[in-house]
Image: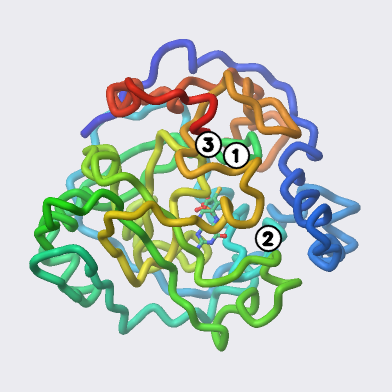
Amino acid sequence: MIIKTPSKNAAHEHEVTDQAVYQGRRKVLKQLGYTGALALLSQSAQANPFKWFSDDDTPTFKRNPLSFEKSDALINPMTQEGVATSYNNFFEFGTSKNDPVENAQGFVVNPWQLEVTGMVENPIKLDYDDLLKRFPLQERIYRLRCVEAWSMVIPWIGFELGALIKAANPLGSAKYVIFETLNDPAQMPGQRSRFVGGGIDYPYVEGLRLDEAYHPLAIMSVGMYGQTLPPQNGAPIRLVVPWKYGFKSIKSVVKIRLSDKRPKTTWELLAPNEYGFYANVNPEVDHPRWSQARERRILGSKLSEQRRIDTMMFNGYDEVASLYSSLDLRSNY
Ligand code: MTE
């Protein structure tokens, strides 16, 4: 599917967002008493906020080309690959933006199994290779809008989440889909220490309503920029839900469980008044500590390659609006 971008999104403004905005979540940790997480920002990162784009971050993880149906439209200028793969949130590997690329290179993603279980008629457990054989891959160029008010445009490769769920044949009573990241403290330093991992109780858990999960825009991604996912972006398989804040797009998924009960998700548990279950991108509902009306679009590492733009309702993916026609989006943030 080709996702077209409304022209208003093409507006270019060569401004730079205050760094304090995207460091805001570390303030939550501080409020919650996790002062150690703040100390994790290295001296150089504090002195130079663009350290995470430095040339030393040379990934050593081997990525392979993927065969996929290529999309034929470019929406917005895309974010440079080197930036999308070195400025990351993956708290299992540390809370600074450059921690994942530095700490995840030895991450073992083969063998990997993903199970779909719970309220289904046909529980399945698939190897990574089975997944690639069973579900034809497509390219989807999506905007990724983080709750911290920065955004990127990324060419993902993946398949529709709905196809995977249908393969397990959910029971009629199933209403929610719950996702879990690998729990492997031996490999993930953030799972060994509450300070390194931002005080999260791992494994990282996310969830969607079943009808949201069936929306064709929701994909399981196995690659980006024509190749397999690097570990810092959630190798070997992650969720991408482009109309929701980035924290819903859970990485390195090992388990998908169907349930009739809404789960408590990771960020909802950590700060329920700040991060809700729905987390739909919404410029009219501010985060309690910052505005969500605008965002800093990151295209490259130079200041001239970052611009402040208006945030769009549902991140511009209006086709999902009917999922929420009977929901108050202010109280269901
Ligand atoms: N998944 C796990 N397991 N752990 C995380 O810390 N961070 C989330 C999301 N998925 C996160 C995660 C957040 S806050 C964002 S913005 C996106 O991943 C960032 O994805 P990217 O690093 O590929 O841009």
Depth check, front residue: 225 or 169: 169
Q: Are marks 2 and 1 in contact (CB under 8 Å)?
A: no
Q: Residue at x 29, y 40 (%)?
A: 212
Q: Amino acid at mark 3?
A: Arg
Q: Amino acid at mark 2?
A: Asn
Residue 203 x, y percent position in the rendering: 50, 71
Residue 13 x, y percent position in the rendering: 66, 17
Count all numbered tags in the image, as a single digit.
Answer: 3
47 sits left or right of 108 in the view: right
Alpha carbon distance from label 2 to label 1? 18 Å
Q: Are marks 2 and 3 in contact (CB under 8 Å)?
A: no
Secondary structure beneath disc 1? loop
Q: Which residue is mark 1?
A: 147
Q: Is residue 253 above or below residue 308?
A: below
Q: Residue at x 69, y 67 (%)?
A: 199
- Checking the image for residue 145, the label placed there is 3
**Is the C-beta of the residue carrying label 1 under 8 Å from the nearest atom of ligand 1?**
yes
**Badge 2 or badge 1: first in the primary sequence:** 2
Q: Are marks 3 and 1 in contact (CB under 8 Å)?
A: yes
163 sits left or right of 107 in the view: left
Q: Residue at x 44, y 61 (%)?
A: 251
104 sits left or right of 48 in the view: left
Q: Quadrant of residue 127?
A: bottom left
Q: Is residue 184 above or below residue 202?
A: below
Secondary structure beneath disc 3? strand
Depth check, front residue: 194 or 136: 194
* Front position among marks 2 and 1: 1
- Checking the image for residue 265, the label placed there is none
Q: Is residue 105 above or below residue 223?
A: below
Question: Quick one: quadrant of the N terminus?
Answer: top left
Q: Residues within 10 Å of mark 2 (few under 14, many from 20)?
A: many
User: Residue 41: in sight, yes or no?
Assistant: no
